[in-house]
Image (tube, rainbow, N blue to C red):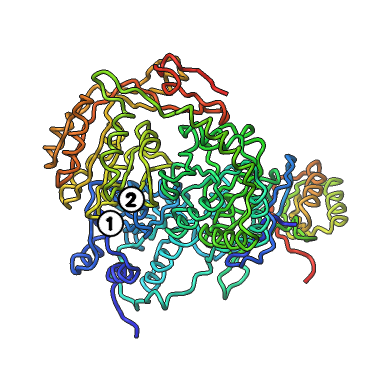
Amino acid sequence: MTRQMTGAKMVVQALKDQGVDVVFGYPGGAVLPIYDELFQQEEIRHILVRHEQGAVHAAEGYARSTGKPGVVLVTSGPGATNAVTGITDALMDSIPLVVLTGQVPTFMIGSDAFQEADTVGITRPCTKHNWLVSDTARLSDTLHQAFHVATSGRPGPVLVDIPKDVQFASADYTAPEDAKVSHYQPQTHGDLNMITELVEALEQAEKPIFYTGGGVINSGPEASALLRELVNATGFPITSTLMGLGSYPASGDNWLGMLGMHGLYEANMAMHDCDLMINIGARFDDRITGRIDAFSPGSRRAHIDIDPSSINKVVKTDFPIVGDVTQVLTDLLDIWKARGSKVNRPALQSWWSEIEDWRKVRCLAFTQEGKTIKPQYAMERLEALTKKHDRYICTEVGQHQMWAAQYLGFEDPNRWMTSGGLGTMGYGMPASLGVQVAHPDALVINVAGEASWLMNMQEMGTAVQFRLPVKQFILNNERLGMVRQWQELLHGERYSHSWSDALPDFVKLAEAFGCKGILVSDPAELDDAIMEMIKYDGPVIFDCLVEKHENCFPMIPSGKAHNEMLLGAASTKDAIDARGAVLV
Amino acid sequence: MSALQIKKGSSSHSAYNLRPQFSDAEERHTLAVIVDNEPGVLARVVGLFSGRGYNIDSLTVAEVDHTGHMSRITIVTTGTPQIIEQIKAQLGRIVVVHAVHDLTVEGPSVERELALLRVSGEGEKRVEALRLADIFRANVVDSTLDSFIFEITGTPNKVDAFADLMRPLGLSEVARTGVAALRRGT
């Protein structure tokens, strides 16, 4: 049976049929018919943000914490252009989003109409795919296709631009099951011969390491379960990128911690010295590899990735496997078990003793003394006081993000929302809203720096309006901390425009928004303040004044190799005096 | 053989080999990209090349299957083998791209380009231009008392050679279609 309806109604119907329960958006002239339809139904909840960038980040938080696509609805022109940063962020981190934008009516396109922008043109390079729908008869099919593309293969953001006359016109609605089958069907099964070759290498490896990334999380919870099985059964060490934290538990015996520019000493040294690197769902990002010609010089590399273009893009691969992580790990485990679950035990033992020596460096050690809170101490206490909770962590971008990654432990996937690829300051605050919407009873904390947080602080209004009890945990050093750190290390301590001398009073700001503000500056009062934050039933802005000149270590300076890490404060008492100390 | 003949939706039996055997020498490759003929598809392909800093030496596009709304884009590009593989992989993941064929590595192929050249001159030069055109099997498609327009079809090298010869004889304007190419055999 075909159903005639308007384009606007089709949008809402298609969202329902795709299982969408929440939309993040902001109305405007070119989407009013769709908003009118949203008004006349109860099934889909709409979260009104304060800026379209916030809507996209919120949808990213929703998507990353649930595994479902996030949905955004914004108007034409500025609505669409404001969304561009968030869409680019989602593309870089492979987050499935369906972004719906209004457009001026088809007969006005190209006339420089009010609030007209070439949205599909602007977003072509920052979406996985996009469509301008010029005929209502094709709208429902396009919407179903949009969900298919966003969630198939390597996930990513898609955008559907819908002119206003297309929203008003009527046509037959096509249900998802009747939609045209897309030719876009990415390969999910890896080549079994190559997987078998990898298994042979696994069996013989003397210094193996698993290097995992966001692809494991995107592949779904089963991928993480398989990864845990594989790591535990082989006894190999495992490290992860920023995006992959949680796929293997931080409390697991084989966990080396995060790798990369601010990764752990043991993780980077093991990557440098390994003889078999098994990359699962990561992409050899420059934050990970450091100097590429000195990257892990003695290893053979396996690369499991669903995107063929990731393979051999940066690092040449000896065992290239294109496929979905869940599928490839299933096959790999089957083959390895069928061949007798063999590993090179004696070699592994001496490999682990090397790793233990690196662990003894205790690269994250710090000393909390005096009356100023060290940011690392704040993270350590936040971890201690919240880890038993049903907890989700978001971050902004900068030093605090790295400290959060280093000092917080993630036991499960989908619990860690951060802007990895694009490094978008202003991501975390709205992302925390999306997470809280998806998990209303969970403890959702956005670890922030004050500078990043100010970039999208208007979304506190959204938190208050929709009673989303997000906790904004701001490590306030009154500096652009990471910029300041680089200026100290690389630009002769000339701190060009990296401090703010007109910050708001965050407690008063919280009051102005109608939520709770907490200020803490004394280490002795930190625990009580964190407990107060956790217990408060509502959104909190937590202003934690920290040491202003603390640097984030370990650090692989740009252009250096994994074994040329700066350990800074960890190896000596004073990070600044230890600057330039290069350990080999 | 092509390192990246990954058919979308293919099973674990796909016999691709991504193992790199890359040299650093630049190579010229002719790629045939089969795409849905829909608005913006050319912008996606061209944007990929400009956005990622790849070269386009020549590009042609036209719908080749009217019922299926499919177009064929023929791109001639240069790059190291690693870059060429990356270009093919990046093209392959564009949603509206159905197939990417590297005609340079998929066995012998034929390449043709059509060019129109305006040659202006009088007397001896005019006679010489006509004589050379005959040797190159170029056709005269327009003539005035002091100019010809020649139509020539051939490989880009042949067109280059003809244009080089016409230059001293009064070549004043050239229009070229870019390369169209097909694999030989059935």
In the foreground, B144 or B111? B111
Q: Position of residue B71 (x, y in %)?
A: 60, 65
In percent of the image, x 47 and y 33: which residue is there? A264
Nearer-the-camera pick, B96 or A316? A316
For disc 1, the marked residue is: A438
Q: Quadrant of the C terminus of chain A?
A: top right
| Quarter assignment of residue A403 | top left
Q: Position of residue A122 (x, y in %)?
A: 42, 49
Q: Position of residue A490 (x, y in %)?
A: 47, 20
What secondary structure is marked by label 2?
Answer: helix
Q: Amino acid at mark 2?
A: Gly
Q: Residue furthest bottom?
A: A1
What's the CA distance linking mark 1 and mark 2?
A: 9 Å
Task: Say which chain tag 2 marks.
Answer: A
Please name the residue shown 80% across and 58% down the image. B138
Q: Earlier in the sequence, mark 1 or mark 2?
A: 2
Q: Which residue is mark 2?
A: A61
| A113 on left or right of A440 | right
The reply to whether the C-beta atoms of the residues labelled 1 and 2 are less than 8 Å apart is yes
